[in-house]
């Protein structure tokens, strides 16, 4: 049901979802909230909501795209992938305590990295942090969630004008914030996605074929592999929902059996690189990307795929049906968290 709500009320409802569904915060957990300085108003609400839910301690870290731009412009190439030790220590401590990690997205300045060397942009990523973070996720050491914060820059990208209220309305429709009880609605939705994953697992498909404009791609599936959905569980048995919104069921494919060409029907927005990739088309042969083309941003994708041995291979395929709340908005959000839940997709790396 859609009712009139101002952005402050929607922000508090979204924060409530992040805390009570996303990380499913339990009394006594430590929390780390990470975002950009432009996300500060939402991060403060998230911190307050976490403390109200019984958080032991909330750590808030802000990053700055202007500082990141200066780093990419001036540092030696080996520093582009370096991880400061104090960042790893905070991550280690959070995982050791079984804490909760909340990351805020929503690009406030999509053009800030324009003109930078695309190869340096594609390479600029804290590799040790990314590897350590993925290891802890695979170990299910902590609960985590990614959410988006509507802001003028993001609204400008989506609508061509900085209409934040309009973007909040779109986010609310995509995340069920207008429902009478959004938290209950989300747990019901998670159960529905789980039933879809179970149905796919019972069929034990050998491969999935994607077809469409510019796309004819066959992706082999692992024997005994599992389709999963929104509900994750920590090693301590705490259920949580890492993406808000989420509409997908997904699996890790047999990367060796990927052949054909896939063309993206939507722009691919890469906020950490400050790049929007348009008209992306990738050809795979025996599991590896052998050709990358795009009307803009191709060099950034090529740089990402050259990062390590697995970067040019598929790590995920996901199915999204027409009932998707995100897809029903009819909006391209220029944000992967949202746009990947509008339609079926694949992920490299």
Image: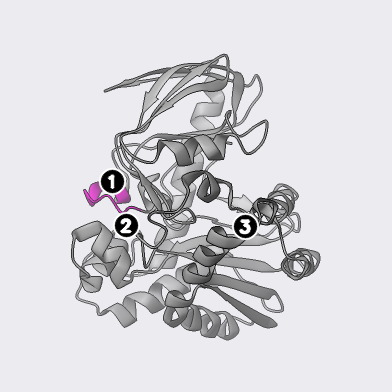
Secondary structure under badge 1?
Answer: helix
Relative image position of residue 128 (x, y in whole percent):
73, 53
Span colored in magenta: 326-334
Residue 247 numbered tag: none
Circle 3 Cα neighbour tier, 10 Å, few/some/many (<14 / 14–19 / ≥20):
some
Q: Nearer the viewer, residue 296 or 223?
A: 296
Task: Examine the rendering and report whether any part of residue 55 can be seen.
Answer: no
Residue to which mark 2 is pinned: 174
Distance, label 3 to label 1, CA atoms, is: 26 Å
Q: Is residue 61 left or right of residue 265?
A: right
Above or below, comparing residue 215 to residue 52 in the picture:
above
32 drawn magenta: no
Relative image position of residue 12 (x, y in whole percent):
40, 79
Circle 2 Cα neighbour tier, 10 Å, few/some/many (<14 / 14–19 / ≥20):
many
- If you read the primary sequence from the N terminus, does the residue marked by circle 2 or circle 1 appear first? 2
- Quadrant housing the C terminus: top right
Relative image position of residue 109 (x, y in whole percent):
36, 66
Q: Are marks 3 and 1 in contact (CB under 8 Å)?
A: no
Relative image position of residue 33 (x, y in whole percent):
58, 73
- If you read the primary sequence from the N terminus, does the residue marked by circle 3 or circle 1 appear first? 3
Residue to which mark 3 is pinned: 239
Circle 1 Cα neighbour tier, 10 Å, few/some/many (<14 / 14–19 / ≥20):
many
Q: Are marks 3 and 2 in contact (CB under 8 Å)?
A: no
Secondary structure under badge 3?
Answer: strand
Residue 327 numbered tag: 1
């Amino acid at each position: 049901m859609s009712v009139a709500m101002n952005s402050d009320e929607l922000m508090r409802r979204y924060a409530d979802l992040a805390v009570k569904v996303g990380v499913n915060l339990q009394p006594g957990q430590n929390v780390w909230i990470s975002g950009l300085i432009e996300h500060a108003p939402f991060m403060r609400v998230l911190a307050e909501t976490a403390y109200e839910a019984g958080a032991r301690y909330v750590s808030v870290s802000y990053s700055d795209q202007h500082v990141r731009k200066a780093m990419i412009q001036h540092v030696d190439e080996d520093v582009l992938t370096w991880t400061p030790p104090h960042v790893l220590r905070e991550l280690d401590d959070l995982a050791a305590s079984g804490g909760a990690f909340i990351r805020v997205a929503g690009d406030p300045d999509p053009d800030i990295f324009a003109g930078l060397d695309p190869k340096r942009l594609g390479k600029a990523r804290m590799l040790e942090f990314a590897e350590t973070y993925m290891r802890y996720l695979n170990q299910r050491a902590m609960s985590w969630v990614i959410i988006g914060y509507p802001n003028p820059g993001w609204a400008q990208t989506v609508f061509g004008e900085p209409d934040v209220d309009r973007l909040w309305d779109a986010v609310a429709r995509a995340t069920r914030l207008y429902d009478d009880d959004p938290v209950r609605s989300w747990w019901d939705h998670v159960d529905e996605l789980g039933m879809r994953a179970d149905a796919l697992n019972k069929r034990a498909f050998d491969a999935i074929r994607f077809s469409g404009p510019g796309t004819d791609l066959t992706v082999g599936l692992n024997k005994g592999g599992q389709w999963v959905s929104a509900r994750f569980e920590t090693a301590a048995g705490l259920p949580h929902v890492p993406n808000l919104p989420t509409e997908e069921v997904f699996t890790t494919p047999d990367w060796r059996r990927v052949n054909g060409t896939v063309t993206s029907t939507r722009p691919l927005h890469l906020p950490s690189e400050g790049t929007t990739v348009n008209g992306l088309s990738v050809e795979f042969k025996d599991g590896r990307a052998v050709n990358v083309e795009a009307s803009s941003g191709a060099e950034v994708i090529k740089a990402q795929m050259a990062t390590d041995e697995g970067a040019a291979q598929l790590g995920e395929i996901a199915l999204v049906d027409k009932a998707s709340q995100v897809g029903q908005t009819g909006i391209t959000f220029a944000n992967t968290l949202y746009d990947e839940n509008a339609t079926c997709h694949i992920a490299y790396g």
